[in-house]
């Protein structure tokens, strides 16, 4: 049996989770509760195997996932979200979730997900798997493209200030360099991004997440 904890800030939904999971012999349900800051450490201390987190019920879902991941490297985290929440699911995986389930999932899906993650694998609900994998591939392509740019430390500073809408004069004051030097870096950024103007530099930087 897997020692299990459910985190959900909505009392009605939490009761549904509790009823569903308690009917399955594979789970030893420790508690179904709203999130409080001390819970991740409590779960780690009590050697909880699986934490099921209802992302849609939380004010800061990714912060919550990171808190659980930080508290224990062995504890597995299953995140519940809307089947349309592709961006949320990708963020959850990045924040430490081992598996993604949706609000359309059945008990059999939950049992399969737990078995997978407890064996060291990841699990993604099939109805959103392709979209998640496409999003992850897109993010990886952007990361590699950004790496190829090889921005210098100063170029990175300048582009961040451009993204804040600063003028060359404002950037020169902020970085304590001449305005002529700022113009040089802006020109260099245009070349690297293949941009015709500073707006295109900003748009490309935003696209790549630089």
Image (cartoon, rainbow, N blue to C red):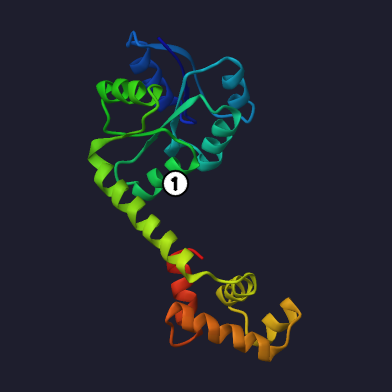
User: What is the crowding at mark 1: few (fewer than 14 residues within 10 Å), some, or many (at least 20)?
Assistant: some
Residue 59 shows in the view: no
Q: Residue furthest bottom?
A: 180
Residue drawn where x is 56% and y is 41% of the image? 63
Q: Secondary structure at mark 1?
A: helix
Residue 177 lies in what quarter of the image?
Answer: bottom right
Q: In the picture shown, does residue 204 fall above or below 113? A: below
Residue 76 shows in the view: yes
Read off the residue under disc 1.
91
* Relative image position of residue 57 (x, y in whole percent): 46, 36
Residue 75 vs residue 118: left or right? right
* Relative image position of residue 122 (x, y in whole percent): 36, 33
Residue drawn where x is 61% and y is 87% of the image? 184
In this view, the residue in front, 6 or 121, is: 121
* Relative image position of residue 74 (x, y in whole percent): 51, 24
Residue 196 lies in what quarter of the image?
Answer: bottom left
């Amino acid at each position: 049996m897997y020692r299990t904890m459910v985190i959900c800030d909505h009392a009605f939904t939490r009761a549904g989770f509790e009823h569903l999971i308690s009917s399955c012999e594979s789970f030893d349900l420790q508690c179904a509760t709203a999130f409080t800051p001390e819970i991740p450490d409590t779960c780690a201390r009590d050697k909880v195997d699986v934490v099921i987190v209802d992302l849609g019920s939380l004010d800061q879902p990714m912060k919550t996932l990171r808190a659980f991941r930080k508290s224990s490297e062995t504890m597995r985290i299953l995140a519940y979200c809307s089947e349309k929440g592709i961006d949320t699911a990708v963020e959850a995986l990045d924040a430490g979730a081992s598996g993604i389930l949706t609000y359309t999932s059945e008990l059999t899906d939950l049992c399969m997900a737990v078995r997978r993650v407890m064996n060291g694998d990841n699990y993604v609900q099939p109805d959103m798997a392709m979209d998640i994998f496409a999003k992850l591939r897109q993010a990886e392509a952007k990361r590699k493209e950004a790496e190829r740019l090889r921005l210098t430390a100063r170029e990175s500073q300048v582009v961040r200030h451009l993204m804040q809408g600063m003028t060359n004069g404002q950037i020169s004051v902020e970085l304590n360099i001449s305005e002529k030097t700022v113009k040089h870096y802006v020109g260099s950024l245009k070349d690297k991004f293949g941009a015709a103007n500073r707006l295109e530099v900003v748009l490309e930087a935003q696209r790549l997440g630089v």
